[in-house]
Amino acid sequence: MSSSKPVTSGTQLPICRTCGVQYGKARADCPICLDERQYVNWEGQQWTTLAELRAGGHRGRVDEEGPGVLGVGAVPSVAVGQRALLIRSPSGNVLWDCVGYLDDDLAAEIEKLGGISAIAVSHPHFYGVMTEWGRAFDAPVYVHAADREWVGRPDPLIEYWTGDTHQIAPDMTLINAGTHFAGGTVLHWSSDPEGRGALFSGDIFMVVMDRRWVSFMYSIPNFIPERPRVIRRALALIEPFSFERIYGAFWGRVVTAEGKASVRRSATRYMRFALDDDPS
């Protein structure tokens, strides 16, 4: 297996300090943070780079998050603070979601674990430095076409898929749940080591502090609830898939049992608090 490439191509490109998304050239603002689902830093737009983050003492972090699943992040955390997940499958490792950090040591550690065959990202807030990751491992980066406008550093490695589902490996299927963002995506892994199926949801189905439940938000930091009709569509799309575990966006945010039932009862609870006269 060839080793990962040195992380050099984008070390000086701008990264938004608030959302952690890297852009292909200097700009005055971050469109992702200007959107009502995110926010601009209270002191105004601020930028950093991979080179600056490394010089400031950031390092990679890799820890177990579940059977066959490793969390991948940074210490200290960058921007939103999410961690990615390395799914170790016999058909090839997949990196689910991304972070705003990468260095040669972290890339080498991932390479020792089998490298990365593909990268898939749930929504724009977690794009991070996904192009840098894709180039380092020569791996395709899957983004739903409905969110194409939010990609800050376009690259031929990015594959824009369409429709409701897309299979990226024999045992892995992307599902366009559509909550949070129009292209909001979850990933189903049918052959997890426990043999019960696992769902990787990022913020699309957000694993909450009571880890028996998830929630559905149009904006998490600004507390804008998702529309009931969008949630109903998402539930219909995941109905054919079986899963016990749900891996959320942050360290330790994992539903370990009855995952599908958890999504169903969470949606039922959510609808109880929705407006009675909702036209959806």
Image: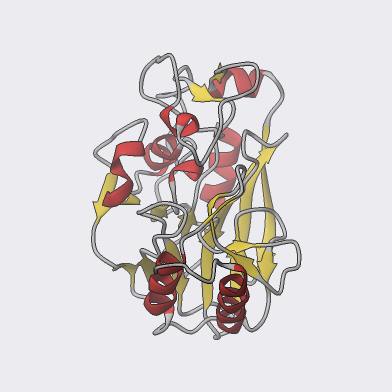
Name the residue nearer the viewer: 85 or 239. Answer: 239
Left or right of 226, for residue 105 = right
Identify the residue at image location x=40%, y=15%.
Answer: 27
Identify the residue at image location x=55%, y=49%.
Answer: 110
Splitting the image into 4 quarters, where does residue 25 fall? top left
Structure colour scheme:
secondary structure
Q: Is residue 87 above or below residue 5?
A: below
Q: Is residue 27 above or below residue 83?
A: above
Identify the residue at image location x=60%, y=42%.
Answer: 222
Identify the residue at image location x=40%, y=24%.
Answer: 9
Q: Is residue 114 above or below residue 187?
A: above
Expressed as whole percent of the image width and height from the top left, the position of residue 213 reads: 67, 72
Expressed as whole percent of the image width and height from the top left, the position of residue 88 reads: 52, 65
Splitting the image into 4 quarters, where does residue 136 fall? top left
Name the residue nearer the viewer: 257 or 208. Answer: 208
Left or right of 49, for residue 152 = left
Expressed as whole percent of the image width and height from the top left, the position of residue 172 reads: 39, 71
Residue 52 in view, yes or no = yes
